[in-house]
Amino acid sequence: MYTNEKINMGEKDEDEGDTDRKDETHEDENQEDGAEEKEEIEETTEELPRQASVRQVYKDIHAQLEDMEGMENFDREYTRLFQEYCKITSYAETLDEENYMMVEKIKDYEIKLEKAIEINNANREIISRYKNDIEYARKMMDASHFREMNSQEVMEAQTKEISQLHNKIERLSRLIYQTDDFDSAKQEKEELLKEKENLNREITMMKQRIENVNTMKESFENDILDLKRQLEDKIDELKRLRQEMKDKTKQYNDSSKKLETEYAKCKSERVSAEEKIKELQAVLIDKQTTEEKLNFCIDQNEHYKNEFFNASLEIAKTNKELESKMRDIEKLTRDNANKTKDLAQKRDELSKLRLEFSREGIKREKISRKLETAEAQKISAQRDAERFKSIITELQKNLETVKKQADEDKTEICDLQKEKLILSRNILQAAATAHEQSKQLKLRDQIKNNLQIEIDNFTIESQKQKKEISSLSRERDRCILETKELTQKINELLHETKQKKNTIIDLKKKLTEVDTKYQMQQNLCQTLEGERNSLNKLLLEAQYNISDLKKEIKGLNHQTEELKEGIAAKERQLMKKQSILKKTEKEREHMRVELQKTRDELESSRQEIFSLNIDMRKLEKIIREADTLSKKQMLENEHLTNEQTILGTQLANKTDKLSNLYEKERLLQDALLKGETQYNQRLEDVRLLKLEIKKLRHERNLLTKNIYGTTDMRQQNFHLERDLTREKLKCRALEEQLQSPLNIHRWRKFEGTDPEKFELLQKIQYLEKRVLVETKKSVDKESKLREIENTCNNLRELLSRQPGPEAAERLQKTQRVLKERDEKIKCLIVELQMNETQVTKFISDIGKTKEELLDFKKKYYDLKLLIDKAKIHEQELSKNFNLPPIAATTTTNNNTSFLGGGYNITRK
């Protein structure tokens, strides 16, 4: 009854496990998001009552075994098996927790991939903006080149006109002293001298400004070189740090792979140990059933037919069940082997995916390095632009001061004209001072020669500037080529990003497939656990039946002893009956009936002996199989010890590797702290750059407004040309007066020149050239400013991409994972020690089983001796009563039959 109740309980548990599995598979098909959390909650809620029921059964069986005598060894083995079962369940729970952690990590990686895709899209938009800016800069460069060509043509035409005017002035200077309007010419010469002095001052001021600009330019170039060196140093440091990170990630991946392989080995060893336990349990069940059958046959000789037939049927059923169970075990082992192969394939796929992720990370690092270099160039260009803007503002202020001075000069000219009217009245007074003025004219001729020398110097400087312009045009062409190369690189990067997106999509699909396969394997593991629990229950029931059968064997032994005493009593009765047979013939008929009964009983007993011989042969075969199994177990134990030594060496190597990993983690943390400080400094630099960009934009707007102010200079040029035509007319009038003199002061020859207006024209042309040069410079600076803005935007994006607090969180996560791995390794070491103890226990159990087999053989031989004695006793009985052999009841022709010990009995 107790065994039937236990079987029913096991069937109920199996039904409940099957229904739970069906529910879980249905939920996995319907719900994709959040299914893992629900499964874990359901598993925990289902495992609690299961564990409670298993513990209750264990307590009940343990109490029953303690009450029984001679079951101490079995009780110990049963407690040991229950402890191993508890350890296996706890280990399975830890594995489920690790699986949940890995699923969470995969989700985090998916979120990070989505963020990377968004950043990629933003980078594409920025690249398109940069392309538009580059095209606009090219157009501006073409326009500025066209303006330069036009300005050069205008400059050449004006130089020709100036040379012609210079020749005319030299001709007229020789004839000036012959004219009557000497005083008016004198006044004009004074005015021109004043203008000449003002222009000389302006020239000196402009030279000083040019020198200042050159010095500033040199200082800027030196600063740029220093910044480039600093950037190269920082880039080298970043490369070194990234290489260290790559090495550590590779070591981490290698350690994780090794731990997975060790986990698979431990799992396979656990499965093999469970299979061995099951085989030993089957062997014990077979032994117990054989002992029960033998005791049952010995004790119940009276009920030979019915009970022995039922026992044979039960043996056949149990053998069939054992064969079916062995087949199921073989199927399960095959399934486990296939599952291990699938797991190995999945791990290989995961390793490939990790390699692809590492390659993509390397490509991203290369792109980030390129962007960092571009941002550094942008920062240097922004600083140059700010400095040039400051220089431009200073030049604008100087221009304003020059304009104010020009207005003041105009007012002075008006005053001088009024004074001219007064001087015209005082011409007579000026005649006395004419000789002195002739001397001054000679001095002015000398000044003129000096000015011509300065003009030659200015022409030489203009040629130098033309050379500089040609070099700048070459640099412009070089910059255009660099922009083309950068556009090509940008297109290549866009193509690479597209390829990376496609690879990311494929990897996501693979991850979904791996998740589905992993869930299927979890369900299969749960089914295997349910079957293991049912087999444990069957084992407990078989052990309980063994105890019952042992009790029955004791009763059968007692019955055999009673039968022996009965046989001795019957022999005494037969001796009495032989004395009575001589006296009475009536009793012969009764004896014949009894003899027939005894013959029938002997036939049945012989048949039973034949069946017992068959059973004995079967038992001998079972004993031989048990011997072979014990030999196999010894070989497997030796293999386990070898594997244990290998695992010990592997664990020692892993501990060394983990110590190295901890040291590298510490170095990485220091590097991260340094990187955070540099990151904060860069943020401050970016903030300052933003302010400087705003200032530069404001200054650019002011420059554009000043460039539009060149119309005033053109108007001044127009007025000067008009004055020049007037002077030409005056020169013609003087020539006419020379041709037709008025005979006044014929004996005097006045020598003089009027070079101030010519010098003014030269200065105007020189200023126009400078204006054109400055417009070119402003255009170049605008292009540089745009490039600087582009580089600044790239810097911002790079800074946004650079690791911030997320990197620290990742480090913390990796540290936690490493700590968990350390704990797992310690657990594995403890499990190894436990396995060693289990191996020693198995060896001791094998020794005990061998001793039990020897005892069983002794019992078997004792039974054989008893059966041989019974046969000898039957033969003696047949000789004493002259019984014929069984199944051969012969009768003589004289109607005489032989009965008992050779007495002739005749029938009437």
Image (spheres, rainbow, N blue to C red):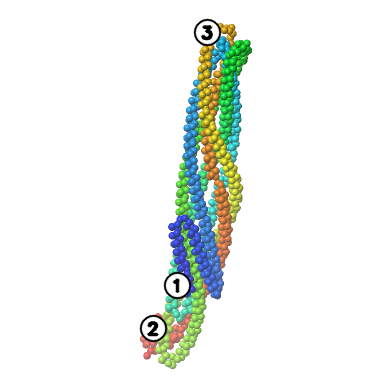
- Element on which disc 3 rests: loop
Q: Horizontal placement of 886 versus 256: left or right?
A: left
Distance Cα–Cα, label 1 vs label 2? 38 Å
> How many residues crowd around disc 3 within 10 Å: few (fewer than 14), some, or many (20 or more)?
few
Q: Give the camera-side residue of 626 and 356.
A: 356
Query: Which residue sits at x=49%, y=86%?
Result: 569
Query: Which residue sits at x=44%, y=62%?
Result: 22
Indicate which label's residue lies in the foreground, 2 or 3.
3
- Asked whether the residues under the numbered discs 2 and 3 touch, taking CB atoms below 8 Å apart as contact, a structural biologist would say no
Report whether residue 353 is seen.
Answer: yes
- Asked whether the residues under the numbered discs 1 and 3 touch, taking CB atoms below 8 Å apart as contact, a structural biologist would say no
Q: Amino acid at mark 2?
A: Thr
Q: Amino acid at mark 1?
A: Ile
How far across and how far down the image is residue 425, in percent? 59, 13
Distance Cα–Cα, label 1 vs label 3? 164 Å
Name above or below for residue 727 compared with residue 904.
Answer: above
Residue furthest to the left: 893
Report whether residue 189 is seen.
Answer: no
How far across and how far down the image is residue 12, in percent? 46, 68
Residue, disc 1: 315
How far across and how far down the image is residue 436, in percent? 63, 12
Residue, disc 3: 740
Distance Cα–Cα, label 2 vs label 3? 199 Å
Of pointers 2 and 3, the one earlier in the residue sequence: 3
Residue, disc 2: 890
Q: Give the camera-side residue of 809 and 561.
A: 809
Query: Which residue sits at x=56%, y=61%?
Result: 831
Query: Which residue sits at x=54%, y=22%?
Result: 764
- Element on which disc 1 rests: helix
> How many residues crowd around disc 1 within 10 Å: few (fewer than 14), some, or many (20 or more)?
some
